[in-house]
Image (cartoon, coloured by chain):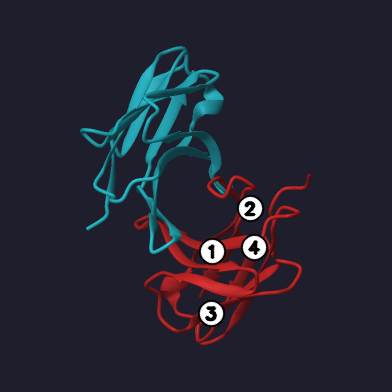
Chain colours: A cyan, B red
Amino acid sequence: KNQVEQSPQSLIILEGKNCTLQCNYTVSPFSNLRWYKQDTGRGPVSLTIMTFSENTKSNGRYTATLDADTKQSSLHITASQLSDSASYICVVGGITSGTYKYIFGTGTRLKVLA
Amino acid sequence: KAGVTQTPRYLIKTRGQQVTLSCSPISGHRSVSWYQQTPGQGLQFLFEYFSETQRNKGNFPGRFSGRQFSNSRSEMNVSTLELGDSALYLCASRGQDGETQYFGPGTRLLVL
């Protein structure tokens, strides 16, 4: 069964600290993996997208890594800011019968405290 | 370019009623997908439309339906509303690269 699991479910850190969010997947066939940031009450916004051949992708203070062999990805946030407080969703895409399918993780809720 | 827009942003209905939500994709995007998001279930895929045809469908009952118009705008309809239908309904349009989805702000539906 195609699944995407994220950990931890929630996380609280102090402003300025770093943190790492995890995403494990069993989706097959695999096409790409993306991380989204979703502020409360808003739609998700894409942070990074990686294909099978990419190991790392950065977007400012956000760095995503991908290990396609172990089917694991992580999102590292450096020098966190209050505005980083949001849910972070891992999404794995695959092509089945010629159409894209997206499997969403349930997200990690991050709270950054002053 | 304007982003994905959804209307209305908030909606309150009672059990048994029906509701229609609207989504306008980014100009030039032909694929529109709908998702239901609840605190306990996360994002659940409803269906995807491309060029007015439903291309993909998630595991939701027949009370959930949709359509897409020739200008790529899409509507989602939920009939005979149940309390459990209370959720944030998100619409996303597919980017030119065919892979990147851009989400709208969502419609928050509350069923009383």
Q: Position of residue B7 (x, y in %)?
A: 70, 64
Q: Which mark is residue B34?
A: 1
Same chain, marks 4 and 1?
A: yes
**Secondary element at image label 4:** strand
Sequence-earlier tag: 2 or 4: 4
Image height of A76 relative to B43, above or below: above
Q: Which residue is mark 2?
A: B104
At a point 51% along the width and 70% down the height, the residue shown is B55
Q: CA distance from mark 3 to mark 1?
A: 10 Å
Q: Nearer the viewer, residue A22 or A94?
A: A94
Asked whether the residues under the numbered discs 2 and 4 touch, taking CB atoms below 8 Å apart as contact, a structural biologist would say no
Asked whether the residues under the numbered discs 2 and 3 touch, taking CB atoms below 8 Å apart as contact, a structural biologist would say no
On-image quarter of the N terminus of chain A: bottom left
Same chain, marks 3 and 1?
A: yes
Q: Which mark is residue B10?
A: 4
Sequence-earlier tag: 4 or 1: 4
Asked whether the residues under the numbered discs 3 and 4 touch, taking CB atoms below 8 Å apart as contact, a structural biologist would say no
Q: Is residue A42 left or right of residue A54?
A: right
Q: Is residue B10 left or right of residue A32?
A: right
Q: Chain of mark 4?
A: B
Mark 3 vs mark 4: in front: 3
Q: CA distance from mark 2 to mark 4?
A: 13 Å
Disc 3 residue type (three-letter): Ser
Sequence-earlier tag: 2 or 3: 3
Q: CA distance from mark 3 to mark 4?
A: 19 Å
Disc 4 residue type (three-letter): Tyr
Same chain, marks 2 and 1?
A: yes
Q: Chain of mark 2?
A: B
Q: Which residue is mark 3?
A: B65
Badge 1, how many Cα within 10 Å: few under 14, some, many 20+?
many
Disc 2 residue type (three-letter): Gly
